[in-house]
C-alpha cells in the first residue's frame, strides 16, 4: 500500500550491529487485515534478534491497532454476558492468579517484607485484569497501569486502578518508585525496546524486580513456521522478537541483570499459527471459524477446548525439548 508509512532500522536494537541481517521469511496481517503488505522478517547475524525490516512507522499505530483490537476489549475473559464469570472463565482466572504468584515467588519478590504498601506498575495493562490479580495477591498495593487505548484505560480506572494513558516511554512517572514493573507481551510491540527497558529501569526502585514476558524465537514452533506462519509474529504488530539470550543482552545494555528466565507454553500463538496456515489454504472466513484469532480471548467452552489442546501439545514439547513459544525473564538492578 503506497500510503502506508514504513521504517527501516539501520542497526540492531539489541547489539547495535550494522551488518546486513539475514532474511528468514515474511509475515502478513491475517487477523485484522490492517494492511496487505507482506513484511520481511530478518535475523541479526550477531545476536539473533528477529525483527520486521521494514516495519510500520509510528504514524501507522492507529491503523494496525484498530478500535476492535482484542486487548481493548478483553474484559470478556472474566465477565459473562450477565456480568458474572462463567465456570470456564473462573478457571482461567484462578489459573492466571496461581501463575502470577509463582512468578513473583520464583523472582524473589519479597513484597510482604516492605514497611509500606508495595508499588506495582503494569505496562500494557489492557483493561486491568492483570492488576486485578495483583490486587488479590497484594490487597494493600499501590497499583498503576499504562495503556495506549483510551477505552482500555477507562475500563482499568473503573476497576479501581490508577491508569495512565499513552506510550510508556513518553509518560511522566515517578523515578525510582515501583517495587515491581510487570509487562506481559508488550516489548515486542514497541518501536524501541532498548528505550523501553531503560524506562523500566528508571521508574523502578533500587531493589525492584522487572518482569518481562514476550514471544520466544528459541522454540520448536518458530523453527517449523518461521518462513511465514508463526503465530508469534502477530504481524505487523510485533516489531521485535527475542530469545532469552538476546533479551538478557538487552537488559545488560540498559543496566539490568537477568535473574530468572523461564520458557512457557503460549497456546494463543499456536491458534494464530493454525489460523495463518488455514487462511492461506482455505481463506480467512474458514480460518476465523475454526481458529478464531480474536474471540478466542473472550472465554467460553470453545476457547477452553482450543487453548487447552494447544497447552497440552506445547506442554509436551516443553517437557521433551526444554523450549516453548514464550518466555518470561526477571531483571534486577
Image (cartoon, rainbow, N blue to C red):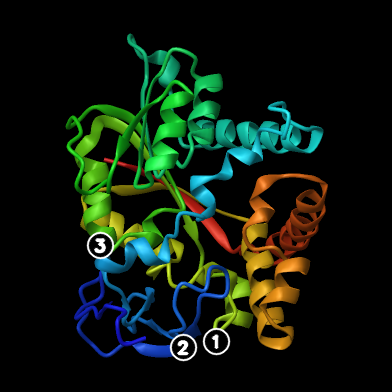
Q: Secondary structure at mark 1?
A: loop
Q: Which of 17 and 169 lies nearest the eye of the viewer?
A: 169
Position of residue 275 measured from the top left corner of the image (x, y, whole percent): 68, 73
Vertical relation: 264 (above or below) 150: below
Q: Position of residue 196 (x, y in %)?
A: 26, 52
For residue 227, the mark is 1
Q: Which callout, 1 or 2, points at the residue further toward the start of the chain?
A: 2
Mark positioned earlier in the residue sequence (3 or 1): 3
Q: Are marks 1 and 2 in contact (CB under 8 Å)?
A: yes
Q: Is residue 20 left or right of residue 329?
A: left
Q: Is residue 273 visible?
A: yes
List x then y, in percent, for residue 314: 71, 62
Image position of 134 with respect to 52: above or below = above
Residue pointed to by mark 3: 192
Q: From the image, tell me which residue sits under label 2.
A: 24
Q: Residue at x 43, y 72 (%)?
A: 236
Determine crowd level at label 3: few under 14, some 14-19, many 20+ residues with C-alpha closer than 10 A: some
Q: Position of residue 139 (x, y in %)?
A: 49, 14
Amino acid at each position: 500500500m503506497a500510503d502506508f508509512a514504513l521504517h527501516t532500522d539501520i542497526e540492531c536494537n539489541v547489539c547495535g550491529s550494522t551488518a546486513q541481517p539475514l532474511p528468514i521469511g515474511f509475515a502478513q496481517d491475517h487477523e485484522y487485515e490492517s494492511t496487505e503488505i507482506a513484511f520481511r522478517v530478518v535475523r541479526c547475524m550477531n545476536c539473533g534478534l528477529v525483527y520486521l525490516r521494514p516495519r510500520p512507522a509510528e504514524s501507522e499505530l492507529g491503523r494496525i491497532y484498530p478500535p476492535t483490537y482484542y486487548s481493548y476489549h478483553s474484559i470478556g475473559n472474566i465477565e459473562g454476558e450477565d456480568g458474572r464469570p462463567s465456570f470456564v472463565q473462573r478457571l482461567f482466572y484462578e489459573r492466571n492468579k496461581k501463575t502470577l504468584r509463582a512468578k513473583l515467588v520464583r523472582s524473589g519478590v519479597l513484597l510482604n517484607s516492605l514497611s509500606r504498601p508495595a508499588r506495582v506498575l503494569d505496562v500494557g495493562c489492557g483493561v486491568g485484569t492483570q492488576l486485578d490479580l495483583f490486587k488479590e495477591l497484594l490487597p494493600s498495593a499501590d497499583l498503576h497501569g499504562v495503556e495506549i487505548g483510551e477505552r482500555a484505560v477507562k475500563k482499568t480506572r473503573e476497576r479501581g486502578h490508577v491508569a495512565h494513558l499513552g506510550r510508556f516511554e513518553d509518560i511522566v512517572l515517578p523515578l525510582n518508585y515501583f517495587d515491581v514493573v510487570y509487562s506481559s507481551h508488550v516489548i515486542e510491540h514497541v518501536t524501541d525496546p532498548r528505550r523501553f527497558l531503560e524506562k523500566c529501569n528508571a521508574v523502578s526502585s533500587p531493589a525492584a524486580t522487572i518482569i518481562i514476558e514476550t514471544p520466544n524465537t528459541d522454540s520448536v514452533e518458530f523453527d517449523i513456521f518461521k518462513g511465514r506462519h508463526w503465530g508469534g509474529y502477530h504481524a505487523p504488530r510485533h516489531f521485535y522478537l527475542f530469545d532469552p539470550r538476546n533479551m538478557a543482552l538487552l537488559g545488560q545494555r540498559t543496566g539490568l541483570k537477568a535473574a530468572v528466565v523461564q520458557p512457557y507454553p503460549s497456546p494463543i500463538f499456536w491458534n494464530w499459527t493454525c489460523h495463518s496456515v488455514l487462511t492461506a489454504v482455505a481463506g480467512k472466513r474458514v480460518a476465523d471459524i475454526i481458529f478464531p484469532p480474536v474471540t478466542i480471548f473472550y472465554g467460553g467452552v470453545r476457547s477452553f477446548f482450543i487453548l487447552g489442546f494447544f497447552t497440552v501439545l506445547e506442554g509436551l514439547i516443553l517437557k521433551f525439548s526444554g523450549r516453548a513459544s514464550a518466555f518470561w525473564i526477571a531483571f534486577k538492578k
